[in-house]
Amino acid sequence: FNGPVGLTGCFTGELFAWNNSTCTKSVGKNHAKLIDAITVTSQHVMTGGRDSKINILAKNNYALQFTIDAAATFPASMAAAVRAITLDSTSTKMFVGTFGHEIYEVPIKLATK
């Protein structure tokens, strides 16, 4: 959830925003395949998909901030499709779970207000 708004990933790569049972917004097609991971922080929404991409979006308007190519970032991965994303308590490290049953730690610097 992003506040009261429910977020779901679609098998075609779109992110949908929901108010109760009504889809209120399609955030756009930022992934080429299914979105498996959605993480919401105080400033960002992160999505990870079977296209091996991690997208960092602005929390307030879902504008794409940047993309991380997991296949290029984790070249030794058995399957770099993204299954889970989380940050440490200081938001300086991202932990990414893959379909290869791997967990990668990535240093990250996210812009804050």
Image (tube, rainbow, N blue to C red):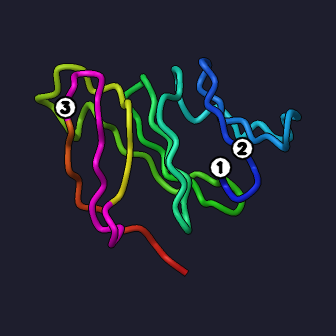
In front here: 42 or 25? Answer: 42
Q: Nearer the viewer, mark 3 or mark 1?
A: 1
Magenta span: helix, strand or loop, mainly? loop
Residue 37's x, y, as percent? 47, 36
Which span is picked out in magenta? 88-102
Element marked by disc 2: strand
In front here: 104 or 31? Answer: 104
Element marked by disc 3: loop
Residue contact at pointers 3 and 1, CB within 8 angstroms: no
Q: Which mark is residue 1?
A: 1
Residue count near mark 2 (Cα–Cα under 10 Å), binned few <14, some 14–19, many ≥20: some
Q: CA distance from mark 2 to mark 3?
A: 28 Å
Q: Is residue 21 magenta?
A: no
Residue count near mark 1 (Cα–Cα under 10 Å), binned few <14, some 14–19, many ≥20: some
| Residue 6 to residue 108: above or below | above
Reading the image, the residue beneath label 2 is: 6
Three-letter amino acid code of the residue under disc 1: Phe
Residue contact at pointers 1 and 2, CB within 8 angstroms: yes
| Residue 74 to residue 108: above or below | above
